[in-house]
Image: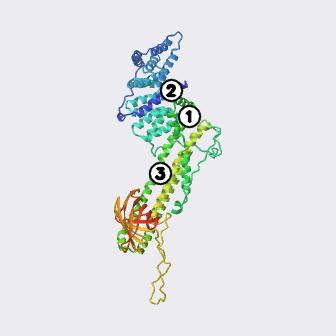
Amino acid sequence: MKLLNRVILFAFLLLAFTRAMSQNAAMYKYVKIDTTKVISEAQLIKIATRFYDRHYKSIYDANEKMFVDENFRKLEANGADKYKIAQGLSSTAVLITGTGQSLDIPVVFSSKAAILFPKDTLIVNNFGAILRMMDSVKTSLPVLLYAKRLFPGAPVILTNLGNTLFELYDDRSAEYFYKRSLKINPDFSLASQGLVSVYLKRKDLRNALEMLFKSVQGIYSESMQKVNENVKYDKKYAPPKEPPVGPDQSNSGNSGQGDGSPNPDTPMESLRLPDFPNWSEMGALLADESIEKVSKKLGQVAASDKTLDNAMQLLQASPAQQQAWYENENKPGRILFNKQEFAMDLMEVYFEDQIDNIDKEYNYTDSVNIEKFGKYIEEISANDEQKAAQMNADVEAWQAFLVERCKSFTNANKDLFGQWKQIAAVRHARYVDLLSTYWIYCEQYLNRTYNPSEFEKLNSKRKSFIAMHFGYLYTDYQIKQMQFGFANIASFASVMGDCPKMPPPPPPAQTKDDNVNVPDKNLPDCPFKDSKMKIGLIVCSIGLDCESIEGECGEGLLVGAKWNYKKKELTGFGGAGFKADLGVEGAVNIKAEAKAGFEVTFNTKNQLVDVAYKTEVTGAAGVGNTEVGQAVEFKVSAATGVDISRTTELTYNPIGF
């Protein structure tokens, strides 16, 4: 009998899902149906007789005809309990409807039972429901209205009546009967699913998902799960209420679940989430090596969920293996486990929506702060072209300019870090609060599982959800490390934001009273040793370092010249190269460049002193019109042999990149 009830239930649920998910453009149609007219008993028998005759004549298969006649002969046997046999025919009709084995037999059996016992509530209800599914939706309406008159308080009759009205496009009347059914039995899940269909038709996702939350408390069904997969939560949806926590309901890691739970010996685990790291300054963030370790650990926890792997194994299984799996899934214990797992799925979608709202608020505020930072950089760089023209080739002026600019940029970057830290701390705290709440809400579902292995599956699902979303925070912290570090480098500072210092002042000029005129053998080294200042002019650039000044032009094919004012040598270059822009517009500029070619060097007497082949690779990052990078040069020279050097380049582009 239990199997029969489950088959009947599955048939109704499958129909509810099919109706909800296959509505076409006509789903928006509304028709008001008159539900006040109720037929008489004689009219019911007339309807049942008409459908009996039509479908009995349509049975052409010999086996089906033999099966029907054998069951009808039982009614004619001496001493036969016709009422019990009629109930069996009605139940068998529902069973065959659910399996889809025949189109005519369900109508024949249910109509025959209705003809014999037109005052039996269950028989008339089954006849009306089968008419709706197998033959005539319109004719099922008067039959179900007649059944409602027999038993006005039967939730299954009210729900079937709602299903018929819904299919006749009267969703308002359908909603009324669904709600009446739930008022009589709040846990009648078929009525809840009917309301889900009504709300989906109206695009009222909030109420649709609210009913899904409620219906999962009544009974689990595959159709509910499929409906859930096709809708999206809204922040107004509410999860199931948190279970009461009393003084005796401990949640420590060493305690069991209590004698009242299905698995009392399975230990519960407490949740501990990392606090927001105490980064007092930007350098603490950049030097924090624990971020990567925490992120990796959380990623390992999230990857422990084998749900996807299990699904792939099922798809690859043989038909016999799949059948064995389905039989196991339909055991009472598995049904309960699936129900709790589905309830947790609903919870996850709800909390994911809440987390999305948190991220949207954070991303908006962070983007506003970054935009302010970019505008400030533009303001302090507005007069760079004029300053560059005034400095000309004055090395000391350029040095002072770069130091001043570095301090301005790095100070702005520190302000940006302070603003980010505030909003990131708020987001972190809200994540902790939300995910801790999710963890507590899930306890009620874990406590209802039957055995420790199923408990561990649900607990793994819960831990994976926590780790996946919390791991996102630490991934974002790693990205911020790179963002602030690159911004410092673009300011011509170290990764930590330390700017170069001006060289000490030169010694005082000698006067006429000096008796000794000996050159200072320990002159201060160039403070920008292995560094170069460049000015970009679209496809050309001018570079200046402690020994030389050079110019280069071209895209693809390159030509250039360099004057070494210490050695008094002129070097010409010709070759090929390419450039790649890896940055994001409005954020940090990231570029890569490579070139290769030949160099020839002449002295002041126009004599050739060296020939070389050179390859150079440059990587640079910047903000606004300024970028900083590293250039690695590999040179094979006739005069000096193989030489590898690294140079830091600061490039200013007065007319943009």
Residue drawn at (57%, 42%), measured in percent from left and top?
459
Q: Disc 3 marks which residue?
A: 358
Q: Disc 1 marks which residue?
A: 336
Amino acid residing under circle 1: Leu
Residue 353 against residue 262 in the figure, above or below: below
Amino acid residing under circle 3: Ile
User: Mark 2 and mark 3: span between their CA atoms?
Assistant: 44 Å
Residue 41 on image: x %, y %: 42, 19
Residue 565 on image: x %, y %: 40, 74
Q: Count of labels shown?
A: 3
Colour logic: rainbow
Q: Are there few (<14), some (14-19), or many (20+) residues within 10 Å of tag 3?
A: some
Ranked by sequence position, the earlier of labels 2 and 3 is 2
Q: Disc 2 marks which residue?
A: 7
Residue 59 on image: x %, y %: 42, 16
Q: Which mark is residue 162?
A: none
Specify the quadrant that holds the N terminus: top right
Ranked by sequence position, the earlier of labels 1 and 3 is 1
Q: Is residue 262 left or right of residue 505?
A: right
